[in-house]
Image (spheres, grey):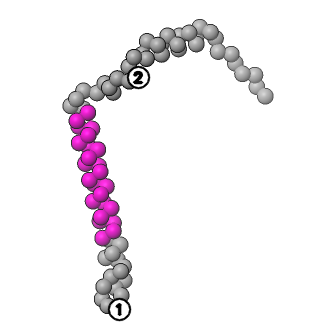
Amino acid sequence: MPQARAIKPNLIADWKAAVLERLHTVFEADGLPDADRQRITELEQLVGRQAYKLEILEKASRLLRAPASRTGRSS
């Protein structure tokens, strides 16, 4: 089994300093401007509507392709 390499204490100290320097931003807003956040919301809603329409169209397509029963209705 290969020997694991040791992480130098200076590297850990650098990582710790970087984390502590940015720690206050962890719970802040995502930093996006309001216009960008609004546009993302609009696009997410559009994707949701398109997915819903696609689901309806797929169901309608399956119904139209289904063979008619003896009563003339599709199942």
Judge from the rendering whether residue 22 lies leftward or rightward of residue 61; answer left or right: right
The alpha-carbon separation of the residues under discs 1 and 2 comes to 65 Å
Whole-percent x, y for residue 14 in the image: 53, 10
Magenta stretch holds residue 61 = no
Where is the N terminus found, in terms of image quarters? top right
The residues colored magenta run: 37-60
Q: Is residue 68 above or below residue 6?
A: below
Whole-percent x, y for residue 67 in the image: 36, 83
Residue linked to disc 1: 70
Please tell me which residue is depicted at 25% across the width and 48% down the height of the picture: 46
Judge from the rendering whether residue 53 lies leftward or rightward of residue 21; answer left or right: left
Q: Is residue 10 above or below residue 39?
A: above
Whole-percent x, y for residue 9 in the image: 62, 9
Our reading of the magenta stretch's main secondary structure is: helix
Residue linked to disc 2: 26
Whole-percent x, y for residue 32 in the image: 28, 27
Q: Are marks 1 and 2 in contact (CB under 8 Å)?
A: no
Where is the C terminus found, in terms of image quarters? bottom left
* Disc 2 residue type (three-letter): Val
Judge from the rendering whether residue 23 lies leftward or rightward of residue 33; answer left or right: right
